[in-house]
Image (tube, grey):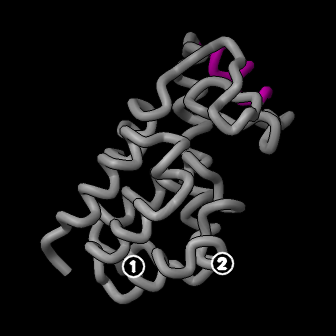
Amino acid sequence: METIEQIMIDEGYREAVYLCPAGKLTWLFGRNIDDRPITTIEWILLRIMLSKGKTMRQWAAQLLMIEADSLIDGFRRDGVILRRLPGEVSCILINMGYNMGLSKFNPRKWPNFFKAIEGRDWKQAAIEGRDSKWWRVDVRTRADRLMKALENVEFD
């Protein structure tokens, strides 16, 4: 899945716990373990995967895929149906959602952005994305690339 691969590149992989720009304990492919600690089931999954010769990195990629599925469900609960959008737009939203978490990236916190998405006005959505702390401070290179991709979506 192209979205997962891009998030893996954007987040980078670290086996050592670190502080993200928002001051949260983070691990693996950008997993915010302050807000989303590793669950018992996820630790069991690690044990199973290691017993089958898999690596920590493969386990981290599996956790990222599970999180992406959870993001899609979260968007759906918020009324954002990704399958109705061009694939590139869906990938951008999942990437942004993974980076910020749905508690910060949702239609209530980003109403103008999601209104533009709903109206299929990609250029306006990119403008709204750039009018944010996320773009200005948090992950400027990633945010700029995603907003450029969004404003250049050519089909509807």
Q: Residue at x 28, y 74 (%)?
A: 122
Q: Nearer the viewer, residue 17 or 135?
A: 135
The CA span between labels 1 and 2 is 14 Å
Q: Is residue 118 left or right of residue 71?
A: left
Q: Is residue 84 left or right of residue 75?
A: left
Sequence-first disc among 1 and 2: 2
Q: Residue at x 63, y 33 (%)?
A: 21
Q: Residue at x 59, y 59 (%)?
A: 71
Report x, y in % for residue 6.
36, 39
Q: Is residue 112 left or right of residue 20?
A: left
Above or below, 142 against 70 in this view is above
Residue interval drawn in magenta = 43-52
The residue at which mark 1 appears reads as 117
- Number of numbered labels in the structure image: 2
Above or below, 43 against 80 in this view is above
Instruction: Name which quarter of the figure residue 82 lies in.
Output: bottom left
Q: Residue at x 61, y 24 (%)?
A: 28
